[in-house]
């Protein structure tokens, strides 16, 4: 798809992944509108290009969403609550910021006759699958987190609008992403703990949880390749987005400690899960996306190290709202 000269809305465009997509769209000469309430995003991450218009506003405010959507030709929907671990502490947060916000966006699109949307879903919606690597068409398991359940509900809304109102939708079930501008997740948690006390580090679970990660640059390229090359015969497309490899939490801890130059005493909380809703094994089958010519360029270790280096260069992120 040629985005040059087209109006494109990026919700959550001041956040980690969204801001990288804004940069990619600016490079493609799109006219970008960013909608972000800055609850977890940062205004300074948004491109200063004259091609970018910034709207500080909430997806739960229908009037604001309607204004942002008007005149657009394509929507990238990154705005969401992404806190998996503490979801049970704030059960309405996933419902409101993921499901209701997505419904508001889709209604605004319908009112303005904007019918193309790409959505970042999650590999967490697979719960604890028995099929590893997990393909897009695996039997849908019992949901183990409110976050995963809310993203599954969002996918249901998108597919219903696609088939009911003639939308073209792309849903990307992503592993955890890493890289510059990273502001939430295990790498920043470990780095923050080691910054406070480099002599010890407490790790949730038994350290043998196996997860796949993806550098944010590879995620952006994968999303754009899918939009450009996926067959348009169907209104709704689902793609796994992840690396073909995975690592143990213990491996991630080792990489982080080596980059920071520390040798802490490691203590483990025990158990196969870090918290309720934590899937101990995440590895997605990305054959569908790879068949379109996409391959990740960065290894998982590259992604971890690049994240740690960026955090060292931006220590204010440790104190930022999260």
Image (cartoon, rainbow, N blue to C red):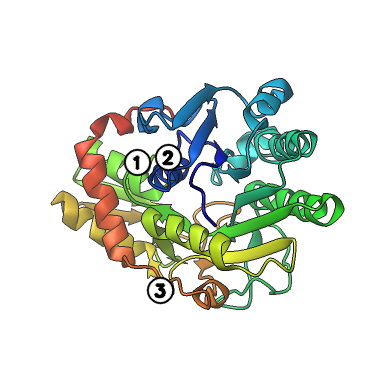
Residue carrying label 2: 19
Q: Residue at x 66, y 32 (%)?
A: 69
Q: Relative to residue 283, is residue 100 drawn left or right?
A: right
Residue carrying label 3: 245
Label 3 vs 2, first from the N-terminus: 2
Q: Relative to residue 253, is residue 233 drawn left or right?
A: right
Q: Please tell me the numbered disc located at residue 181.
A: 1
Q: Nearer the viewer, residue 238 or 261?
A: 238
How far from the left and from the top, in percent, is residue 288? Answer: 57, 75
- Report the mark closest to the observer, 1 or 3: 1
How far from the left and from the top, in percent, is residue 155? Answer: 72, 53
Q: Residue at x 52, y 68 (%)?
A: 281
Q: Quadrant of the C terminus?
A: top left
Q: Residue at x 56, y 40 (%)?
A: 8
> Is 217 rendered above or below residue 23?
below
Distance in Å between CA atoms under marks 3 and 2: 26 Å
């Amino acid at each position: 798809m040629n985005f040059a000269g087209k109006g494109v809305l990026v919700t959550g465009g001041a956040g980690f992944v969204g801001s990288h997509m804004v940069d990619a769209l600016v490079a493609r000469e799109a006219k970008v509108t960013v909608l972000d309430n800055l609850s977890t995003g940062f205004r300074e991450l948004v491109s200063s290009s004259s091609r970018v218009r910034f709207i500080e506003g909430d997806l739960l405010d229908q009037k604001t969403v309607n204004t942002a959507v008007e005149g657009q030709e394509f929507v990238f929907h990154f705005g969401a609550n992404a806190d998996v671990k503490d979801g049970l502490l704030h059960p309405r947060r996933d419902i409101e910021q993921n499901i209701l916000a997505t419904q508001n966006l889709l209604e605004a699109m319908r009112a303005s006759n904007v019918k193309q949307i790409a959505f970042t879903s999650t590999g967490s919606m697979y719960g604890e699958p028995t099929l590893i690597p997990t393909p897009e068409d695996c039997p849908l398991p019992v949901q183990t987190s409110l976050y995963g359940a809310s993203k599954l509900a969002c996918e249901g809304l998108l597919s219903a609008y696609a088939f009911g109102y003639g939308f073209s939708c792309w849903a990307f079930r992503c592993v955890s992403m890493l890289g510059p501008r990273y502001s939430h997740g295990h790498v920043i948690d470990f780095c923050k703990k080691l910054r406070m006390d480099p002599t010890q580090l407490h790790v949730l679970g038994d350290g043998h949880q196996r997860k796949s990660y993806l550098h944010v640059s590879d995620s952006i390229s994968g999303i754009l390749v899918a939009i450009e090359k996926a067959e348009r015969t169907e209104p709704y497309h689902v793609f796994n987005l992840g690396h073909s490899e995975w690592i143990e939490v213990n491996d991630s801890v080792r990489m982080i400690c080596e980059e920071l130059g520390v040798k802490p005493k490691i203590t483990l909380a025990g158990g196969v899960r870090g918290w309720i809703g934590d899937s101990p094994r995440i590895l997605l089958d990305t054959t569908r996306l790879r068949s379109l010519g996409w391959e990740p360029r960065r290894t998982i270790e590259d992604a971890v190290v690049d994240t740690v280096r960026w955090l060292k260069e931006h220590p204010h992120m440790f104190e930022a709202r999260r």
